[in-house]
Amino acid sequence: MPELLALVKHDCPVCDQVLPALDAAGVRVLSQSSAADTAAQAARLGLSRVPELDEELATSQRFDPDAVPTLLLLDGDDERDRVEGIQRDRMAALAAAAGVELALGDLPERRVGCASLTHDPEVAARLAARHARAEGRIRSRELRVGELEDVFEALHDRGLTDGLPVVPPTPERVVEMLGHTNRDPQDVVAVLPPYGAEATVEKVAINAVMAGCAGPELPVVLAAVEAAGEEAFALHGLLATTHPAGPVIVVSGYPGFNTGVNVLGQGDRASMTTGRALQLTIRNVGGGRPGVEDRAAHGQAGKLGMCFAERLDDSAPWPGLAQDRGVPDDEPGVTVMALEAPRLIMDQLAREPEGLCASLAMALENVATPRLRLAFDAMLLVGPEHGRIFKDAGWSREQVQQRLHELTHSPAGELVRGAGGSPEGLDPAWVSDPAMPVAKFAAPDRILLAYAGGDAGLFSMVFGGWAAGDIGSAPVTRSITPWL
């Protein structure tokens, strides 16, 4: 014989109307409320017995009602039918099917119930986290913080921050963050140095929460972690070097990121937190701690986390950097590159590509030192007023790269040690012809070009790279689409 089970809560006036009839008929009732509130409700209504407690809301979570009171007709563990709120005729039919007679004459014909406690946002988040833990979707060890501890100070004291306060990564927040990707939380995104730790989707999501990501940025962070974990990126070397470079994320074609005014500055949550999430993942998963594994002599503010998005509107002179580097045109992408802090390039007089390239080339010559040749790559972030010059002239990205490469050649005699009074430079023994031109960069495509910024200002920015090619780090580009 089927049985009846009712779900109620103490602060629901509709439950108050139904409970006396359920009590009189001996129907089993589970309360979503605390023991004290349930007992107080039973006393207030004069019930013959206090309803049982729905411990941990396990039954409510299983049947997931939208509203209470909910009257369930169960056949063993299986639900055959239900009524939420008051529907007098249907409640009577359920009772008859269970061989129970309910005195419903004093009830209204129909009344909408109250929202189930499982739909309270805070409770729902807690239940979702518990369910994810039970299913094995989240497996990370939980850090217990004492009642008298300040959670922000506790995370800092345990070495889990970048020096700034982080958002406490509660299971509820992590599960909510994981809702922004369809990937399994235990999928491995990358194996990160220096300790060869597996950065799973869950681990990355934890650090995205800590960084302050709102949620939609998670696929971008995942793609960036994947790129940074590639052998060609040489993350271990980047961590160990005394050079100030850090990973910079360039986002191409993903919505929600600032691409205009102050594109490299503060104010845009998506950009600020995405770069920070990558760095926190490297620190907390891979083990790259400043002063320990991270040996940068000076570092720079960008090592907190640097991310910017390209401006790909009608003003753009070229396709997105990621698309130019192999990501399909209909997919967003990221390019991660080891770079130092950006510096301004100002040319307010150039009106044609040749003159502008000459100004950009002078800035590129100064990456690290003009005497250092072939060892570093660079990135130019071309501003809209400069970009317009290239666009109006019809110059492709490849044309600009080629011309910049040609212009960043200098006579060997100007680069030898002692020239101009500087002891830095080429060993004179290597220079047989002082007039021989020596390239600054190994190839034109070692000068990456991106486009973003505000409309006003005849400015661009140059980022110097770290050791390039086989001796260092190569830029890595990945599609974001697999992480959506």
Image (cartoon, helix red, strand yellow):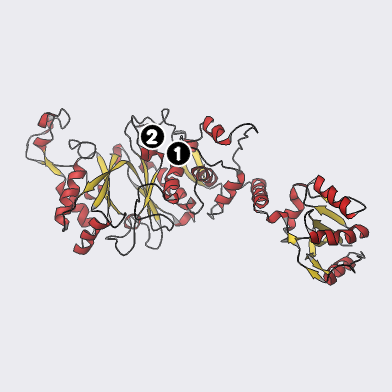
Q: Amino acid at mark 2?
A: Leu
Question: Is 413 placed left or right of 478 in the picture?
Answer: left
- Residue 140 x/y as whole percent: 59, 40
**Marks 2 and 1 in Cβ contact (< 8 Å):** yes
- Which residue is depicted at the point 40% across and 63% down? 330
In this orientation, which residue lies closer to the viewer: 70 or 468?
A: 70
- Residue 150 x/y as whole percent: 58, 34
In this orientation, which residue lies closer to the viewer: 308 or 425?
A: 308
Sequence order check: which comes first, mark 2 or mark 1?
A: 2
Question: Is 433 placed left or right of 282 in the picture?
Answer: left
- Which residue is depicted at the point 44% across and 43% down? 276
Whether residue 238 is visible, yes or no, is: yes
**Picture disc at residue 163:** none
- Which residue is depicted at the point 49% across and 56% down? 484
Q: Amino acid at mark 1?
A: Ile
Q: How many numbered discs? A: 2
Question: Is 242 placed left or right of 362 in the picture?
Answer: right
- Residue 50 x/y as whole percent: 88, 50
- Quadrant (top left/top right/bottom left/bottom right) for the N terminus: bottom right
For mark 2, does the 10 Å Cα neighbourhood hold few (<14), some (14 to 19), or many (20 or more) residues?
many
According to the picture, the residue beneath numbered tag 2 turns out to be 239
Question: Is 461 placed left or right of 107 in the picture?
Answer: left
Q: Secondary structure at mark 1?
A: helix
- Residue 395 x/y as whole percent: 21, 60
In this rendering, the answer to whether 54 lies above or below 72 is above
In this orientation, which residue lies closer to the viewer: 235 or 155?
A: 155
In this rendering, the answer to whether 267 lies above or below 156 is below
Q: Secondary structure at mark 2?
A: helix
Gap in angstroms between the C-alphas marked 2 and 1: 9 Å
According to the picture, the residue beneath numbered tag 1 turns out to be 282
